[in-house]
Image (cartoon, helix red, strand yellow):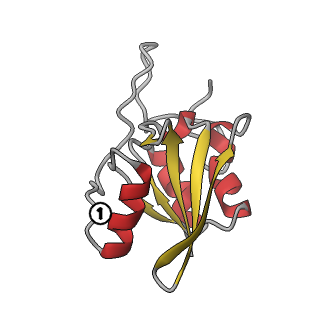
């Protein structure tokens, strides 16, 4: 099992579509055997789901996330735990213990101030999780 967590300064980053780093944990027999921070800079909204799949990730813990990204992750079989916050290592330990605090209904909570509403984007085509055109 590989778990990715949106990552910034040891904390769960709160906007999946703008995440520059993920901490990826390798889990065997219910225990973390390896972890590393990987850069996703340059991937953007549309490519983050594919980026995670290429890394072998099957589970994602994150803060806010838009509808397009949710759909893309679901289509490639990545289990999603949105609405998490705090220390990334603790979140992973809590997930493995079955005590993770998350909100399955959490949607993108970051509004850009330019009048668009996260989750209601139109890309004109499926861009593998595109959650907007920036």
Q: Position of residue 58 (x, y in %)?
A: 57, 69
Asked where in the image residue 133 lies, by quadrant, the reply is: top right
What is the x, y in percent for residue 92?
Answer: 42, 62
Q: Residue at x 48, y 53 (%)?
A: 70
Nearest the viewer among 83 and 113 is: 83
With 100 as the anchor, is 60 left or right in this view? Answer: right
- Name the one closer to the observer, 124 or 128: 128
> Observer-nearest residue: 63 or 109?
63
Q: Residue at x 58, y 48 (%)?
A: 22
Q: Is residue 93 left or right of residue 5?
A: left
SS class, disc 1: loop
User: In x, y percent, where is residue 109?
Assistant: 35, 33
Residue farthest toward the top in the current orientation of the protein: 114
In which image quadrant can residue 99 be found?
bottom left
**Eyeballing the image, is 101 above or below 134?**
below
Q: Residue furthest front?
A: 33
| Numbered label tally | 1
Viewer-closest of 39 and 127: 39
Residue 126 seen from this side: no
Q: Residue at x 56, y 37 (%)?
A: 19
Q: Which residue is mark 1?
A: 100
Query: From what the image shows, is residue 88 above or below residue 41?
Result: below
Q: Position of residue 3 (x, y in %)?
A: 53, 64
Vertical relation: 120 (above or below) 116: below
């Amino acid at each position: 099992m590989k778990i990715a967590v949106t990552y910034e300064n040891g904390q769960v980053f709160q906007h999946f579509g703008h995440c520059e780093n993920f901490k990826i944990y390798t889990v065997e027999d219910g225990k973390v055997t390896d972890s590393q921070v990987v850069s996703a800079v340059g991937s953007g909204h549309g490519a983050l789901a594919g980026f995670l799949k290429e890394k072998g990730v099957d589970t994602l813990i994150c803060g806010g996330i838009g509808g397009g990204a949710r759909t893309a992750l679901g289509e490639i079989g990545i289990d999603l735990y949105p609405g998490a916050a705090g220390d990334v290592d603790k979140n992973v330990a809590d997930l493995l213990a079955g005590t993770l605090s998350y909100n399955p209904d959490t949607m993108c909570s970051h509004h850009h101030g330019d009048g668009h509403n996260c989750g209601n984007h139109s890309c004109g085509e499926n861009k593998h999780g595109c959650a907007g055109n920036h």
